[in-house]
Image: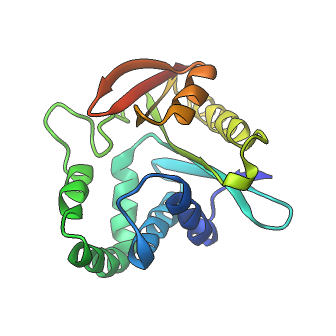
Amino acid sequence: MIRVIERSDAAGIAALHLQVLRSHLRGVAGSHLVAAYYRALAIGKGGIGYVSVENDGRVSGFVCGIWEQRLVRGILFRHEWPRLLGWGGILLMLTPALLRDVWSRFVPRRGVGRGSGVATAGGEYELRPIAVAAEFRGQGVAERLLMRLVDDAQNRGFHSIILKTEVDNGRANAFYVKRGFVVERTIDGYNHYRLAI
Protein backbone atom coordinates (compact mmCIF):
# COMPACT_ATOMS: atom_id res chain seq x y z
CA MET A 1 0.00 0.00 0.00
CA ILE A 2 1.29 3.47 -0.88
CA ARG A 3 0.09 6.35 1.26
CA VAL A 4 1.16 9.83 2.35
CA ILE A 5 3.95 9.90 4.93
CA GLU A 6 2.74 10.47 8.48
CA ARG A 7 4.82 11.86 11.34
CA SER A 8 4.77 8.41 12.97
CA ASP A 9 6.57 6.99 9.89
CA ALA A 10 9.63 9.23 10.37
CA ALA A 11 11.80 6.82 12.38
CA GLY A 12 11.25 3.92 9.96
CA ILE A 13 11.85 6.11 6.93
CA ALA A 14 14.98 7.59 8.51
CA ALA A 15 16.33 4.08 9.15
CA LEU A 16 15.73 3.11 5.52
CA HIS A 17 17.18 6.43 4.32
CA LEU A 18 20.42 5.85 6.23
CA GLN A 19 20.57 2.22 5.15
CA VAL A 20 20.01 2.78 1.42
CA LEU A 21 21.02 6.35 0.50
CA ARG A 22 24.41 8.02 0.61
CA SER A 23 24.55 10.44 3.50
CA HIS A 24 27.07 12.17 5.73
CA LEU A 25 24.61 11.75 8.60
CA ARG A 26 25.31 8.59 10.60
CA GLY A 27 24.69 7.04 13.97
CA VAL A 28 22.05 7.95 16.52
CA ALA A 29 22.42 11.70 15.96
CA GLY A 30 22.14 11.32 12.18
CA SER A 31 19.07 9.12 12.56
CA HIS A 32 17.34 11.71 14.75
CA LEU A 33 18.14 14.52 12.30
CA VAL A 34 16.88 12.59 9.27
CA ALA A 35 13.70 11.62 11.16
CA ALA A 36 13.15 15.31 12.03
CA TYR A 37 13.26 16.14 8.31
CA TYR A 38 10.63 13.51 7.46
CA ARG A 39 8.38 14.64 10.34
CA ALA A 40 8.53 18.17 8.92
CA LEU A 41 7.81 16.86 5.41
CA ALA A 42 4.76 14.98 6.73
CA ILE A 43 3.07 18.31 7.39
CA GLY A 44 2.67 18.59 3.61
CA LYS A 45 3.50 22.25 3.03
CA GLY A 46 6.06 22.85 0.30
CA GLY A 47 6.67 19.14 -0.13
CA ILE A 48 5.13 15.72 0.25
CA GLY A 49 6.25 12.19 0.84
CA TYR A 50 4.79 8.79 0.07
CA VAL A 51 5.63 5.56 1.80
CA SER A 52 5.14 1.99 0.61
CA VAL A 53 4.04 -0.17 3.54
CA GLU A 54 3.77 -3.96 3.38
CA ASN A 55 0.89 -5.93 4.94
CA ASP A 56 3.05 -6.71 7.99
CA GLY A 57 3.72 -2.98 8.55
CA ARG A 58 7.29 -2.90 7.23
CA VAL A 59 8.35 0.12 5.19
CA SER A 60 9.42 -1.19 1.78
CA GLY A 61 10.20 2.20 0.24
CA PHE A 62 9.50 5.90 0.12
CA VAL A 63 9.67 8.90 -2.20
CA CYS A 64 9.55 12.64 -1.62
CA GLY A 65 8.63 15.61 -3.77
CA ILE A 66 9.59 19.20 -2.98
CA TRP A 67 8.16 22.25 -4.72
CA GLU A 68 8.96 24.97 -2.18
CA GLN A 69 12.02 24.13 -0.15
CA ARG A 70 11.81 27.33 1.90
CA LEU A 71 8.45 26.22 3.33
CA VAL A 72 9.79 22.76 4.20
CA ARG A 73 12.90 24.27 5.78
CA GLY A 74 10.78 26.76 7.75
CA ILE A 75 8.57 23.98 9.10
CA LEU A 76 11.65 21.94 9.97
CA PHE A 77 13.14 24.80 11.97
CA ARG A 78 9.87 25.83 13.65
CA HIS A 79 8.77 22.34 14.69
CA GLU A 80 12.08 20.54 15.16
CA TRP A 81 14.52 23.20 16.37
CA PRO A 82 15.28 21.53 19.74
CA ARG A 83 16.25 18.29 17.98
CA LEU A 84 18.20 20.16 15.31
CA LEU A 85 20.20 22.02 17.93
CA GLY A 86 20.76 19.05 20.21
CA TRP A 87 21.45 16.23 17.77
CA GLY A 88 23.00 18.56 15.19
CA GLY A 89 25.41 19.91 17.79
CA ILE A 90 26.40 16.41 18.86
CA LEU A 91 26.93 15.35 15.25
CA LEU A 92 29.02 18.42 14.44
CA MET A 93 31.20 17.85 17.52
CA LEU A 94 31.80 14.25 16.44
CA THR A 95 32.27 15.13 12.76
CA PRO A 96 33.39 18.77 12.32
CA ALA A 97 33.80 18.33 8.53
CA LEU A 98 30.00 18.13 8.28
CA LEU A 99 29.72 21.85 8.95
CA ARG A 100 30.67 22.66 5.33
CA ASP A 101 28.06 20.22 3.97
CA VAL A 102 25.33 21.53 6.28
CA TRP A 103 26.22 25.13 5.41
CA SER A 104 26.04 24.39 1.66
CA ARG A 105 22.57 22.84 2.02
CA PHE A 106 21.03 25.75 3.88
CA VAL A 107 22.92 28.74 2.43
CA PRO A 108 22.56 28.86 -1.37
CA ARG A 109 25.48 29.73 -3.60
CA ARG A 110 25.08 32.68 -5.95
CA GLY A 111 23.24 31.74 -9.10
CA VAL A 112 22.20 28.33 -7.76
CA GLY A 113 18.79 27.23 -6.48
CA ARG A 114 18.33 26.99 -2.75
CA GLY A 115 19.65 24.05 -0.80
CA SER A 116 19.91 21.15 -3.21
CA GLY A 117 21.55 23.02 -6.06
CA VAL A 118 18.31 22.78 -8.06
CA ALA A 119 15.65 25.46 -8.19
CA THR A 120 12.31 24.25 -6.86
CA ALA A 121 10.21 27.34 -7.45
CA GLY A 122 8.55 28.69 -10.58
CA GLY A 123 6.92 25.53 -11.87
CA GLU A 124 9.56 23.05 -10.71
CA TYR A 125 8.80 19.97 -8.68
CA GLU A 126 11.86 18.13 -7.36
CA LEU A 127 11.89 14.39 -6.76
CA ARG A 128 14.06 13.77 -3.73
CA PRO A 129 14.69 10.82 -3.07
CA ILE A 130 13.33 7.34 -3.89
CA ALA A 131 14.57 4.58 -1.61
CA VAL A 132 13.60 0.90 -1.60
CA ALA A 133 14.67 -1.67 1.01
CA ALA A 134 16.99 -4.30 -0.45
CA GLU A 135 14.56 -7.19 0.14
CA PHE A 136 11.86 -5.43 -1.92
CA ARG A 137 13.95 -4.42 -4.94
CA GLY A 138 12.86 -5.78 -8.28
CA GLN A 139 9.21 -5.95 -7.19
CA GLY A 140 8.06 -2.66 -8.74
CA VAL A 141 8.07 -0.64 -5.50
CA ALA A 142 10.18 2.19 -6.95
CA GLU A 143 8.03 2.30 -10.09
CA ARG A 144 4.81 2.58 -8.07
CA LEU A 145 6.29 5.27 -5.83
CA LEU A 146 7.48 7.24 -8.85
CA MET A 147 4.07 7.02 -10.54
CA ARG A 148 2.37 8.24 -7.34
CA LEU A 149 4.72 11.22 -7.22
CA VAL A 150 4.18 12.01 -10.92
CA ASP A 151 0.41 11.95 -10.29
CA ASP A 152 0.87 14.34 -7.37
CA ALA A 153 2.96 16.74 -9.47
CA GLN A 154 0.36 16.69 -12.25
CA ASN A 155 -2.51 17.23 -9.81
CA ARG A 156 -0.68 20.27 -8.43
CA GLY A 157 -0.28 21.71 -11.93
CA PHE A 158 3.46 21.22 -12.40
CA HIS A 159 4.80 20.70 -15.91
CA SER A 160 8.04 18.95 -15.07
CA ILE A 161 9.83 16.99 -12.39
CA ILE A 162 13.52 17.53 -11.74
CA LEU A 163 16.01 15.50 -9.75
CA LYS A 164 19.70 14.92 -9.34
CA THR A 165 21.64 11.76 -8.69
CA GLU A 166 25.31 10.90 -8.37
CA VAL A 167 27.03 10.29 -11.69
CA ASP A 168 28.45 7.00 -10.36
CA ASN A 169 25.07 5.68 -9.16
CA GLY A 170 24.48 3.43 -12.17
CA ARG A 171 21.33 1.78 -10.84
CA ALA A 172 19.56 5.08 -10.14
CA ASN A 173 20.67 6.66 -13.43
CA ALA A 174 19.43 3.65 -15.43
CA PHE A 175 16.11 3.68 -13.54
CA TYR A 176 15.41 7.35 -14.29
CA VAL A 177 16.52 7.24 -17.94
CA LYS A 178 14.31 4.18 -18.53
CA ARG A 179 11.34 6.17 -17.19
CA GLY A 180 11.87 9.13 -19.49
CA PHE A 181 14.06 11.48 -17.44
CA VAL A 182 16.60 13.36 -19.55
CA VAL A 183 19.98 14.60 -18.31
CA GLU A 184 20.10 18.38 -18.70
CA ARG A 185 23.58 18.89 -17.24
CA THR A 186 26.22 17.36 -15.01
CA ILE A 187 27.59 19.49 -12.18
CA ASP A 188 29.88 18.58 -9.27
CA GLY A 189 29.47 14.84 -9.78
CA TYR A 190 25.67 14.92 -10.14
CA ASN A 191 23.47 14.33 -13.17
CA HIS A 192 20.57 16.80 -13.20
CA TYR A 193 17.48 15.26 -14.82
CA ARG A 194 14.12 16.56 -16.00
CA LEU A 195 10.90 14.73 -16.85
CA ALA A 196 8.25 16.65 -18.77
CA ILE A 197 4.76 15.80 -17.54
> Residue 34's spot in the image, x, y percent?
45, 65
> Residue 152's spot in the image, x, y percent?
63, 37
Answer above or below: position of 143 versus 49.
above
Q: Quadrant of residue 44?
A: bottom right
Toward the viewer: 186 or 195?
186
- The residue shown at (75%, 51%) is 136
Q: How is the image coloured?
A: rainbow
Is residue 188 among what the camera can see? yes
> Residue 5's spot in the image, x, y percent?
63, 58
Q: Residue furthest right?
A: 55
> Residue 196's spot in the image, x, y percent?
53, 18
Answer above or below: position of 71 versus 67.
below
Answer above or below: position of 85 versus 115.
below
Q: Quadrant of residue 133?
A: bottom right
Answer above or below: position of 81 versus 101.
below
- The residue shown at (24%, 71%) is 95
Tally the numbered discs.
0
- The residue shown at (49%, 52%) is 21
Is residue 51 among what the camera can see? no
